[in-house]
Image (tube, coloured by chain):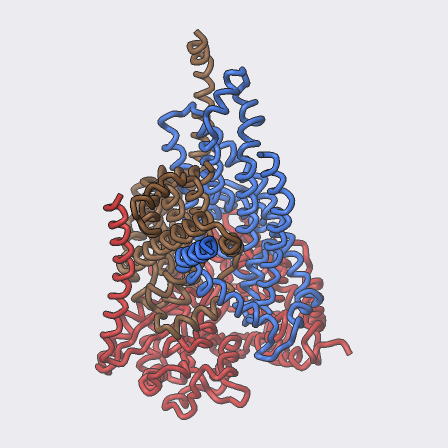
Amino acid sequence: MIHKKGRFQTQPKNLIVHLSLLFFAILALGPIFIIIINSFKTMEGIFTGPLKLPNSETFTFDGFKRAVAQGNFVRNYANSTIITLGATVLTVICSCLAAYGITEYTTKLSKMIAGLFTIGIMLPVTLGTIVIIKMMVKFHILNTHISLILVYVGIFVPLGVILMVTNFRTISNELKEAARIDGANEFKTFLIVLPLVMPGVAAVAAITMLPVWNDLWFPLILTAGPKTQTLTLGIQQFVGTYNNDWQALLAGLVLSAIPLILLFTIFSKQFIKGLSDGYGK
Amino acid sequence: MKSRSKSLVFVVGLSLIIPATIVSTTAVAATKTTLTIDSWRTDDSKIWKEVIIPIYEKANPGVKVVWAPSPSNEYDSALSLRMKSKTAADIVMCRPYGLTKALIKDKHLTNLTGLPGLTNFTKQSMQSWADAKGVPFCVPSASVGAGFYYNKNIFKELKLTVPKTQAEFIAVLEKIKKNGKYTPLVATGTSADSWMLDQMGLQLVGPYYWKGDAGGVALDNGTRKVTDPEYVAAFEALASWKPYLPKAFSSVSYSDAEQLFILGRAAIAAEGSWSVKEMAPPGSNVGVFGAPVAKAGDKPYVQVLADHGFGINAASPNQAAAKKLLTWFTTKEFAQVYANSLPGFFPLSKDKISIDNKTAQAWLDLRDGAIVNAPIGMDKMNTGTPNWFSVTTNLLNVMMTTKMTAKQAAAELQKSLESWYPPQKKK
Amino acid sequence: MQSKTLARRRRRQLLLFTSPALAFFLLFAVFPLLSTIYISFYQEDVFVGLENFVFLFTNDEASERLLYAFLHNCQFFLIAASIQLPTALFMAALLTSGRVRRMTSFYRTLLFIPTTLSVVIVGFIWRLIISPLWGIVDYPLLGEKLTALPTITLMSVWQYMGIPMVFLYSALLSIPSNIIEAAQVDGASDLRIFFRIKIPLIAPQIGIITILTFIWTFNGFDIIYALNGGMPGPDYATDVLGTLFYRTFFGWGADLGNQNLGAATATVIFFIILLGTAVYFATVQRRLKASQL
């Protein structure tokens, strides 16, 4: 009886919740929809009615054609993928190892290390740009993907460690003890508990990937040559000295946004779980 | 569990190996001399890659030229960082004054004394990229001009004639405004594009009042002040545009202004020769006129604005090859190709060049019989903090978008100069 | 004896596990930063002590810019935090209300998409939408001193809403269901459960995301730079510490930049953030944790 009554009452409430979320979703997606429709328009079409759908007069693929034709679009895509993947994977690995160490061997030193990483979250690393270039020149890796990967790992590993620490804290000691009794060494034990924090890994990966993919500054300074140019930097070429090629710029931006949107759609469950597991302690 | 960790190791390995192989393959392909050119002209990539570079490579088979521009807004900061860390391109595009002078001072550019072909340029055109003694460090390659585009169809419809004097100019604007169908005049109102109000505003109309280069020298020496009548009058001439600008002017960006004109909604645009391709595409009916003179009978002033040149990175290992390429940049062949590939950018060499684009030629014609002058304030008064350019552009933006008067703007500018510029300091 | 070797072993293990992360962090973040802070005591290779800092705080022009940039940052942070956090919390509450069931992940994914975009795209599209010439607003929001900064802040809020939303969403998810069920059995209403039970329980997470927003807004400048460049107007009305640092360090327009002064600016910014964070942890977060226990 109670159950039935509850159900009857919640129906309109459900509708309100749906409508509110729908409102927010439209607010979030409306502008993106506008970007997409404008990327299929002529210059005149964009500026005479930016909120209108393309019609037979204003519809064109020109922007996409120019975005792909000019600059090494495919190579830039590959460069961005390599750099983002490399930086993300390395950040995740280093964060997991460090977080395991910090949670497993709690000493004064481990607290200090954790504190150091906490401060690391707030460092404005762009400030060190000159020293970073000089280092890359010394290591002979300027204009390589590796130079960017190294810097990004340095920048994003602190947040990764802190997030993973909260994840590793949720793992019970029993599992680890069981592994140790079975004769596993410390690294093996780490590998055994690692799958339990996979959601955390997804969260760290997500938070690293976003800024790396979209960064403009370090690619400009460290990998400006055409061979290692990233997608974000390549698209910037459509921003001219005086005049911008809006069509190509919009089309390029749309194409460059697709991979991240796809990744987040596919992995959002793991990402969320990683964050919530971290809080579950 | 095991397979998962294995695949993780695999992905890591892969992510490290792929970049490494790419690095090693790039290192192999260096049998030809490769010359890299850095520039802020991202807009010209296509022309360089498809027209200019092939001509040179065909004549010089041992050389590969790579055009590698940086985004315009970040060019200066990226270049000075790269120069300091000795990682800049072999050949760099030189801004007039500013950064180039600083690079010369820090010995980052190669001395070009004795480069064959430099005799092809006047001393005046070398000025923006030479040191205090006149030693050249860049090959001048292009100048631009500022003035107005006008829509001939609108002029015909409203029976207007091209204005010659400031009074006629205001009368024409008034007529267009009264008609109500079109925005009389477009310029740029956003702060990010406020350089435009200086280059295509104050510096365009000002020379009639401050008498060209003499007015600049007088400020540099401290014999005159910005608050003196001739400078205030220049500010006032610009402020007189206010009633004729587009609605919500403070949000009109440079591209907004261009679009208004291109779409036929605005009759006149304060602009520059560099926009010929956008503002006067084939099939359009667009004309060009220069700054209206202060009163009838005055000789017109025209600015030949040095836009860019090319210099050699002193740290480049390919000095000889780079000098050879720069020598080609001084030739008539290059000037001819450049002028026709990039209409609106005019070679600075003494060679007579024919220009195919009619609107570009119209810009060049403005120079006939006019007194050539340079923008004021851009050299000495730009070397301290706060510099002339930042203060002026900001003040012009405020003056044109708020109630600030020409007098107030001039007073503010004078105050800022007095705060640091020795010749203008209060005695 | 044994405990001593055990302690040593633990310490060795700790260092072994943390060394890769520490190596990257120290080498590519801390070292470049420290050596840059070091140059803030120099001017053109000559040691000048605190002179750069004295200039920043006493020169008429420089100190005015610094003060305004700081105030603009505070304004940015206050607007962002006061709109973003409640809205994100509201969204998270809707998502965890259990009333949308299978649609939850659908909505959650949609709401997060703006966060994946680059600022270039965000700046462009909002400028077009609110342009008095082409868009839907008749007032030059970005061109007037009073409205420019709040307008940009709102664009940033729109873009980054996803981050506090998922943080708070996952925090709400991690509340043990037996606590909620117990309250329901006691007859508490949904609203009452939310405000009296859920919010106090996730207060530490709300605190963390607030302080992260603080750090990000004081370090960040990307959307302002993308929209208004390095001298963000009108009349510096949208200049924040990040753009001030960029302009001082790398130069803008005819200003060629001064690395030493730029380094000093960045050092000041860093200490502002450090101070803000320390004060927060010493007061608010401690109390939040205490109340939870």
Q: Position of residue A179 (x, y in %)?
A: 32, 44
- Chain appearing in brown on the rendered image: A
Which quadrant is the N terminus of chain B positioned in? top left
Residue at image location 46% in from the left, 17% down from the top: A12
Residue at image location 42% in from the left, 88% down from the top: B112
Tell me which corner region of the image, top left, top right, bottom left or bottom right, holds residue B332.
Answer: bottom left
Give whichever of B345, B302 is nearer the camera.
B345
Residue at image location 36% in from the left, 44% down from the top: A202
Q: Farthest top residue? A: A1
Q: How many dots with numbers?
A: 0
Q: Is residue B212 left or right of residue A251?
A: right
Tell me which corner region of the image, top left, top right, bottom left or bottom right, holds residue A143.
Answer: bottom left
Q: Is residue B258 visible?
A: no
- Chain appearing in blue on the rendered image: C
- Chain B hue? red
A1 to B27, vertically: above or below: above
Give whichever of B116, B69 is nearer the camera.
B69
Q: Is residue A123 left or right of residue A64?
A: right
Q: Is residue A208 visible?
A: yes
B169 to B378, vertically: above or below: above
Q: Farthest front residue? A: C1
Q: Position of residue C167 (x, y in %)?
A: 47, 39
C76 to C49, vertically: above or below: above
Q: Position of residue C93 (x, y in %)?
A: 49, 30
Give whichever of A211, B199 is nearer the camera.
A211
Give whichever of C74, B328 is nearer the camera.
C74
Which quadrant is the C terminus of chain B positioned in? bottom right
Residue at image location 37% in from the left, 82% down from the top: B316
Q: Position of residue B109 (x, y in %)?
A: 44, 83
